[in-house]
Amino acid sequence: MISFSSTFKLSFRALRVNKMRSALTMLGIIIGVGAVIAMLAVGTGASSQIAAQISSMGSNMILVVPGTTTAGGVRMGAGTQSTLTMDDAAAIEKECPAVSDVAPTQNGAAQVVSGHLNWSTGITGTTPGMLNVRDWPLSSGRPFTAQDVRSATKVCLLGQTVVDNLFGSADPLGQVIRIKKIPFIVIGVLGPKGQSPNGQDQDDTIYVPVTTAQKKLFGTTFPGTVRAIMVKAKSAGDLAAAEQQINELLKQRHHISQKQDNDFTVRNLTQMMQAAEQSSKVMTMLLGAIASVSLLVGGIGIMNIMLVSVTERTREIGIRMAIGAKTWDIRYQFIIEALTLSMIGGTAGIAIGLGGSKILSMLAGWPTVVSVPSILLSFGFSGLIGIFFGYYPAYKASLLDPIDALRYE
Amino acid sequence: MAIIEVSNLSMTYRLGDIDLHALSNLTLSIDKGEFVAVMGPSGSGKSTFMNILGCLDKPTQGTYILDGQLVGDISRDDLAGIRNRKIGFVFQGFNLLPRTSAIENVELPMLYAGLSPAERTKKAMAALKSVGLEGREHHHPNQLSGGQQQRVAIARALVNDAPIILADEPTGNLDTKTSNEIMELFVKLNNDSNITVILVTHENDIAAYSRRVIRFVDGALVSDTRQEQRR
């Protein structure tokens, strides 16, 4: 048996003899590997963007909103009824063991003024628990406290976008801004979070104590009602339990019998987002599968050229056999030739895939993430294709009859 | 001492309903160091005989003992091994690998014998020198004359120290002057290294270089004569 390095040299030389043909054969694999890497990069980019947005939204989140009102047979949609109260929020926190943090919210939009600058933004009245629910650390200052909520103090936390628009690069801490002409002291700045899963700028917001929002800014239909209650479950595994506990607790608190519809809705936000992430993963696999078809076609190209090459080189095979090449010497030579074709093609394909996904993200604006496993996968796959599609031509070559092969013109 | 011994050798090809007897009931022995010319009209069975001697083909009947070893029912790969170690082939059409330098052509048998690259280069250089091609190691076949190409082929046949050279009309594609040079090279190898040379030829001038002439007609041995070697 001849050594691997000698066989490799033989194969490399044979490929160099027909440079144009070898290059064209490789092109199939280059395009295939490039397509697999680029498509996987697009898919992975999309799902990692979704994953990042989910974690920016806060993990293990459940949203409780009031139910619908019906006015003269016209149903008004979720959240139109004021059935959730501060007491509901406190009860959820106290009585649902699967829940770790609770933040009731009362929100609205308002014009905000600081000095000669003004900005329109969403104001959310909430409790200190909000920062835990949203996994949202402050970049400077302090959060407001339970005491601030009890006494409805006029303090606020600004999102980064609001800071940029009202203060530019100046330090907003301790400054006074006016929300609906009421002065608020800026006590903290929320860390930048970026876009939400549905494309909203999460940093374009102001947090104030919920009581301040209810009494001074937006008012309430009934005292103590809130627009929504945001809940964080203790862990991802506790989400379903938390959902059920909240449902049961609120049914009981709102005196809803089995036959009646709930006057509230519990939504598992994280689960919805995870479903979106899951579907983007399926999309990634689909894209990869379609791209691997082109890799397969490239493999068939290799087989085709190797068959031609074996026929063309029948006499060479005969000479080699006459002077002592064994069956597997010949077979290895052609398998390694196919493998070399596909591996060089694979390497070039990786470069094309990397470049292609860069170009895609630049031109189409898609986020692309080239993962190391996708490179290894497509490179390994191209190697397997080389061996698989190279085997038959090599097998054919190795079984030639030396006498016939020597006579071949 | 016989290096080649065939007894009751027959080769039958089946073409449709007809059995074609390419060789029938051949018994012959060739001693080590002999210089034998095989002659006969085309279709007389010389090529079949040479293919069997070269372990490229197996006879349908009879036994063949090569250098003390019975070449009977052995595998393709074992036959390849015997060809590699025992037999050097020289063909009419040279059969060098195209686009491959002289030295790499000569290295081929050693590649399949599993020699190291350094050893291969060393022995190939020596073999090329012994056929008078020093300095042309890196020329490709299309940069060499016919005679030079045949010398490369002879170097390739020699390089694994095979005791037998089988030459199938080695001068068929060469002019008279070059033919004589090639034949003198065979004579030299035969005399100096005691290599057994068996060559097929149509020409009496070429057969004259041998010391024994075997003639075939219709698959049968018709004459086996010894002669004075032409110098």
Image: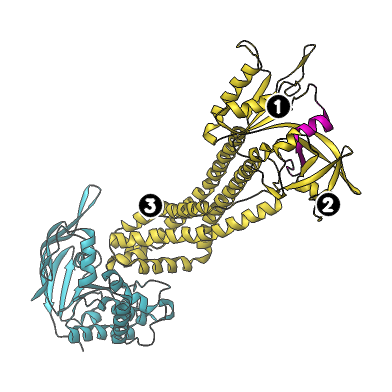
State how far apart marks 2 and 3 are (Cα). Answer: 72 Å
Of the residues under marks 1 and 3, which one precedes in the sequence? Answer: 1
Please tell me which residue is depicted at 57% across the width and 24% down the height of the picture: A245
Residue B152 horizontal side relative to residue A112, left or right: left
- Residue range corresponding to the magenta coloring: A199-222
Which mark identifies residue A392? 3
The amino acid on which the numbered mark 2 sits, given as a three-letter code, is Phe
Q: Chain of mark 1?
A: A
Q: CA distance from mark 1 to mark 3?
A: 75 Å
* In the foreground, B35 or A317: A317
Tell me residue B59's x, y (percent): 17, 59
Tell me which numbered mark, 1 or 2, is placed earlier along the sequence: 1
Above or below B142: residue A118: above
Q: Check disc 2 and report its element: helix, strand or loop.
A: helix
Q: Which mark identifies residue A167? A: 2
Tell which chain the image draws in yellow.
Answer: A
Q: Crowdedness of circle 1 by 10 Å Cα count: few (<14), some, many (20+)? A: some
Is A396 within the magenta? no
Q: Chain of mark 2?
A: A
Figure chain in cyan: B
Pointer 1: what residue?
A: A86
Subunit that carries the residue with mark 3 = A
Q: Which amino acid type is shown beneath numbered disc 3?
A: Tyr
Which amino acid type is shown beneath numbered disc 1? Answer: Met
A281 relative to A305, above or below: above
Q: Secondary structure at mark 3?
A: helix
Q: Residue at x 51, y 60 (%)?
A: A347
